[in-house]
Image (tube, grey):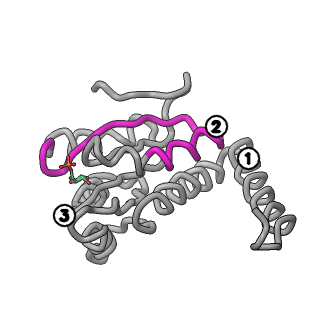
């Protein structure tokens, strides 16, 4: 499997997306994983164009040691739900903003899972991708103190920045 890996460790988080065109959105998730030092891999896996690869990826995820899968897709966004159907590794779904319907289609495709097969669905677009990266780090951080403390520091710095910049009229 030609999976792009970052870092030398075995990946704990798999970041997959339906198309290369999803990368400008999904890289926001990867930026957060890199900030928190979470070993991860990145790959295009399409529910519609490479269905066998999608099944293989999902089927092997647990044995390969993945703790979270972040799956982004747009339009008729079946990737997160279908991956979730083939693994018990938690799946976070990112609705990519589509051209035709601004991501409303992506959101509804991902969020409306039938009871029994959960997908943790984030917001449409870059905010959702960023939050998926943070949430994946929080899940990994349950068992990894170094990651947990990096998430805590990020949250504290974010709070401090707002408190130190209360005047909205200043540049
Ligand atoms: C989905 O179709 C992908 O996730 C992407 O968001 C959308 C459009 O894909 P491209 O036509 O740009 O490859 O499967």
User: How many C-alpha atoms fall within 10 Å of the one at disc 3: few (<14), some, or many (≥20)?
Assistant: some
Which residue is depicted at the point 29% across and 76% down?
112
User: Could you tell me how far apart the alpha carbons at marks 2 and 3 are, in whole angstroms?
Assistant: 32 Å
Residue receiving disc 3 = 76
SS of the residue under disc 1: helix
User: Could you tell me how far apart the alpha carbons at marks 1 and 3 are, in whole angstroms?
Assistant: 35 Å
User: How many C-alpha atoms fall within 10 Å of the one at disc 2: few (<14), some, or many (≥20)?
Assistant: some
Which residue is depicted at the point 38% across and 60% down?
93
Indicate which disc residue 37 carries.
2
Q: Is residue 42 magenta?
A: yes
Q: Quadrant of the C terminus?
A: bottom right
Q: Which residues are magenta?
A: 27-50
User: Could you tell me how far apart the alpha carbons at marks 2 and 1 are, in whole angstroms?
Assistant: 8 Å
Q: Could you tell me residue 67's position as x and y percent? A: 48, 46
- Ligand 1 within 8 angstroms of badge 1 C-beta: no
Q: Is residue 107 magenta?
A: no
Indicate which disc residue 116 carries.
none
Q: Could you tell me residue 34's position as x and y percent? A: 59, 38
Residue receiving disc 1 = 150
User: How many C-alpha atoms fall within 10 Å of the one at disc 1: few (<14), some, or many (≥20)?
Assistant: some
Quadrant in which residue 66 is drawn: top left
- Front residue of 150/22: it is 22
First reached walking from the N terminus: tag 2 or tag 3: 2
**Mark 2 or 3: the one toward you:** 3
Quadrant in which residue 65 is drawn: top left
Residues under numbered marks 2 and 1 in contact, where contact means CB atoms less than 8 Å apart: yes
């Amino acid at each position: 499997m030609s999976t792009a890996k970052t870092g030398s460790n075995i990946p704990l988080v798999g970041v997959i997306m339906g198309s290369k065109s999803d990368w400008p959105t999904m890289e926001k998730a990867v930026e957060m994983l890199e900030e928190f030092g979470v070993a991860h891999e990145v790959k295009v896996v399409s529910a519609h164009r490479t269905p066998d690869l999608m099944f293989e990826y999902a089927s092997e995820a647990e044995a390969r040691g993945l703790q979270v899968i972040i799956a982004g897709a747009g339009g008729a966004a079946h990737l997160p739900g279908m991956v979730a159907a083939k693994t018990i590794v938690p799946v976070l779904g990112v609705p990519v903003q589509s051209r035709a319907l601004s991501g409303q289609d992506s959101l509804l495709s991902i969020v409306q899972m039938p009871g029994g097969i959960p997908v943790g669905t984030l917001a449409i677009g870059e905010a959702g991708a960023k939050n998926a990266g943070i949430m994946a780090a929080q899940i990994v951080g349950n068992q990894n103190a170094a990651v947990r403390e990096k998430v805590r520091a990020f949250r504290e710095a974010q709070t401090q920045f707002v408190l130190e910049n209360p005047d909205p009229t200043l540049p």
